[in-house]
């Protein structure tokens, strides 16, 4: 059996493989082929292995934990809520125990920043337990050993505290929560604005101002998107006791069935000078309610006059080029698309991008900066926000 596996090349699409299978293949020395692997698939899914009903079939995962090309994908797939629920499972299997230790080391190396430290406290505080310390000792102690005063001083010197405050947003959240008498709230992107919702109350905030507010039906199943369109705000929601999404304008309680509904990645959409909003699925107009969006894809454009506009529906889908009325599949390369967008003219070096690369659409940003976003943490170059992992 060993001879059959030795030298066998296996595509490294680990997200879709049971952990036991990955561990078995590591044990028998297969060669992992990473060519053409989508970045979104570069983490394993622990759920099946962790579930109690599969306990008797769990492998310890020791071979995967020690495999130099594989263990990182196991670390990437670890989420705090799963570790909290199945902590004893992680601690009682040698390979899983090693992998969790590497995750703890990774978190500890990030905990010197006040933002990351707060996230660690919020999500990983359950690790501050004797049974965890008994296994990992100083490694877990390091995770929670940062001095709060030192973190605060560092953050103040770096300007992090000032950058992370948004008074208008915080005030809007406080108002909708006060009106709804609830503590929970949700936030929806409508670049450059955001909409905050608690119960049936909505406020849309752009920079230092609330630009719209209103109420939703008192009861609903879900809100899917809230987008400013011209001087209106389109809301896509599923009404109470219904399964299909409906559209409404904020401030008008009349709801309408959507002519069409689409589902894509939640990236950026683009306000147009004529009052429309361009999404990866086409235009939303202030004169009609037709298209309901569960996610609006991602738009790529710059602030140059007559800038081409590219779009992608999903993280791994092909680029499309907007022709002013509809999208056409982009037949060129990613590098050619960046060149067409004029990225070179902003002094950003894309010369090292291989010709066959694909843009990671779900993680990328190429969008004009607005007066209310120009000082964001993302930064600006030539009046645009740029982030494009390849």
Image (tube, helix red, strand yellow):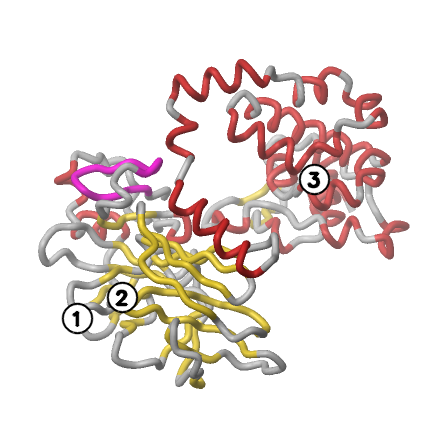
- Label 3 vs 1, first from the N-terminus: 3
Q: Nearer the viewer, residue 229 or 179?
A: 179
Q: Is residue 3 visible?
A: no
Residue lying at 40% horizontally and 41% vertically, measured from the top left? 167
At numbered mark 1, what does the secondary structure look like: helix, strand or loop? Answer: loop
The magenta stretch spans residue 384: yes
Q: Distance between the residues labelled 2 and 3?
A: 47 Å
In front: label 3 or label 1: 1
With 91 as the anchor, is 164 left or right in this view?
Answer: left
Q: Determine the CA span between mark 2 and mark 1.
A: 10 Å
Q: What element carries label 3?
A: helix
C-alpha distance separating marks 3 and 1: 51 Å
Between discs 2 and 1, the one toward the N terminus: 2
Residue ID for mark 1:
324
- Residue 378: percent from the left, percent from the top? 33, 38
Location of residue 96 with respect to 229 vertically, above or below: above
Image depth: mark 2 or mark 3 in front: 2
Closer to the chain start, of discs 2 and 3, is: 3
Q: What stretch is highlighted in magenta?
A: 376-387
The residue that mark 3 highlights is 26
187 or 277: nearer the viewer: 187
Q: In this view, does 384 lie to the left or right of 31?
A: left
Residue 278 got which mark? 2
């Amino acid at each position: 059996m060993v001879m059959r596996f030795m030298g066998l090349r296996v595509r490294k699409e680990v997200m879709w493989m049971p952990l036991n299978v990955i561990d078995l293949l590591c044990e028998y020395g297969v060669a992992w082929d990473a060519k053409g692997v989508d970045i979104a698939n570069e983490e394993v899914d622990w759920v099946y292995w962790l579930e109690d009903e599969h306990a008797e079939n769990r492998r310890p995962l020791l071979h995967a934990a020690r495999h130099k090309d594989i263990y990182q994908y196991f670390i990437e797939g670890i989420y705090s809520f799963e570790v909290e629920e199945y902590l004893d499972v992680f601690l009682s299997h040698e390979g899983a125990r090693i992998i969790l230790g590497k995750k703890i080391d990774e978190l500890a190396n990030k905990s010197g920043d006040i933002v990351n430290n707060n996230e660690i406290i919020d999500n990983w505080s359950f690790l501050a337990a004797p049974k965890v310390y008994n296994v990992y000792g100083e490694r877990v102690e390091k995770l929670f050993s940062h001095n709060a005063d030192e973190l605060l001083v560092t953050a103040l010197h770096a300007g992090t505290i000032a950058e992370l405050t948004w008074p208008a947003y915080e005030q809007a959240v406080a108002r909708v929560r006060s009106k709804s008498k609830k503590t929970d709230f949700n936030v929806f992107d409508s670049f450059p604005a955001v909409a905050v919702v608690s119960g049936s109350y909505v406020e849309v905030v752009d920079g230092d101002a609330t630009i719209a507010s209103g109420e939703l039906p008192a009861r609903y199943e879900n809100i899917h998107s809230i987008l400013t369109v011209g001087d209106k705000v389109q809301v896509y929601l599923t009404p109470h006791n219904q399964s299909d999404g409906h559209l409404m304008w904020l401030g008008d309680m009349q709801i309408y069935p959507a002519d069409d509904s689409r589902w894509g990645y939640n990236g950026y959409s683009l306000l147009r000078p004529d009052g429309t909003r361009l999404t990866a699925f086409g235009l939303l107009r202030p004169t009609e309610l037709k298209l309901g969006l569960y996610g609006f894809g991602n738009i790529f454009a710059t602030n140059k006059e007559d800038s081409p506009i590219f779009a992608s529906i999903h993280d791994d889908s092909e680029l499309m080029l907007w022709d002013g009325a509809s999208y056409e599949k982009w037949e060129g390369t990613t590098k050619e698309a960046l060149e067409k967008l004029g990225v070179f003219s902003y002094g950003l070096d894309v010369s090292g991008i291989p010709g066959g690369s694909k843009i990671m659409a779900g993680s990328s940003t190429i969008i004009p900066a607005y007066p209310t976003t120009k000082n964001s943490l993302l930064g600006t170059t030539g009046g645009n926000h740029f982030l494009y992992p390849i």
